[in-house]
Amino acid sequence: MRIINYVAKGQGIGARWLLLFSFILSIVFAVFVKIGANTLVPHAQDIADQLLPIRIENGIVVEPADTYKEINLGGTTGDQSFRIVVNTLEDDLDPSTLGQGFFITRTHLYGINNNQIRYTKLEGDLFLEKGDHTDLFKKVAFWAAVVMFPFAFIFVFIWCFILVLFYATVGLIWNIIFKKKFDFDFRMRLSTLAFLATYVVFFCLGFLGISSRWLFFFAVLALQALVCSKLAAPENAGKAEKPKKKTKG
């Protein structure tokens, strides 16, 4: 089989397959991010309709003036809820009494999340008009997916590489069991293909509600053992070993 021949005689550690897998998985992740963000567009537009217009001149909110508006973005009531509040009745607020959310006063913007408090003094001029901002929110959703893609790619590749390295290390047991030397590059190529094949199968099984880390672990080992047993057979002796260089004399 070509796969066994690649594992036995191929070059490298199978990194290109991990890169390809990471690329595909990152694209899927980015698509889900965009789809998820798009579902929030109507909600974002509804919030904009309630809050806007907002006009800031010389670091002071002049519109809406002398107004209090509050929108609960989710969570339970009370201090655990996350809110957006426009309170132009005040210049300064006591952050310890606000709970979680974003708070805009006449002169300041407060952001509070899990007891982390950030605030800044408003500066300059700004006008956020009321209207249909659906296209803008959709663009934000698109660029959020684009920005997330490289981070997802790097994370997935590192995650996969560490797992494959782990399985390659565990694969040392096949050297003992089959009494044959399977070198590091061989074990990395084998572990890469075994891991990716098992992941694809378990991804499909996940739709049926079948998921188990231990089952996944032993499935990868089973594939490793299957390939090593074939290469350890007498007719395949020497395939997994590096060819020895000839010496003169």
Image: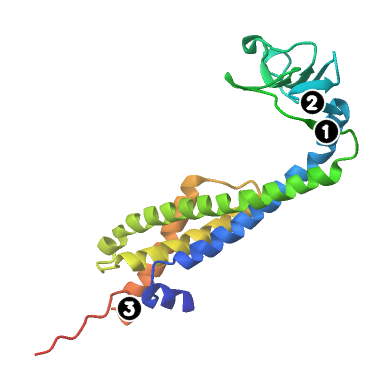
Judge whether 157 appears above or below 186 on screen.
above
In the image, residue 39 lies at what x, y percent?
79, 42
Counting from the top left corner in percent of width and height, residue 157 is at: 49, 55
- Is disc 2 in contact with disc 3, using a CB cutoff of under 8 Å? no
Helix, strand or loop at label 2? It is strand
Mark-to-mark CA distance, 1 and 2: 12 Å
Q: CA distance from mark 2 to mark 3?
A: 76 Å
Q: As shown in the figure, which amino acid type bears the numbered disc 3?
A: Lys
Q: Amino acid at mark 1?
A: Leu
Callouts 1 and 2 close, C-beta under 8 Å: no
* Distance from Cα at disc 3 to Cα at disc 1: 69 Å
Give the mark nearest the N terminus, 2 or 3: 2
Marking on residue 57 = 2
Task: Judge whether 40 appears above or below 94 on screen.
Answer: below
Quadrant location of the C terminus in the rendered image: bottom left
Q: Element at badge 3?
A: loop
Q: For marks 3 and 1, give the one nearer the viewer.
A: 1
Q: Which residue is mark 3?
A: 239
Q: Position of residue 248 (x, y in %)?
A: 12, 89
Residue furthest front as drawn: 58
63, 248: nearer the viewer: 63
Residue 128 is marked as 1
Outermost residue toward the right in this view? 131
Q: Earlier in the sequence, mark 3 or mark 1?
A: 1
* Crowd tier of the residue under label 2, counting other residues whose Cα lies within 10 Å: few below 14, some 14–19, many 20 or above: some
The structure residue drawn at horizontal position 35% and vertical position 74%, both measured from the top left corner, is 231
> Residue 52 in the image: x percent, y percent?
86, 28
Q: Amino acid at mark 2?
A: Glu
Question: What residue is at 38 percent from the left and 63 percent from the top?
Answer: 188
Q: Residue 1: in sight, yes or no?
A: no
Q: Residue at x 46, y 46 (%)?
A: 214
Nearest to the eye among marks 2 and 3: give it: 2
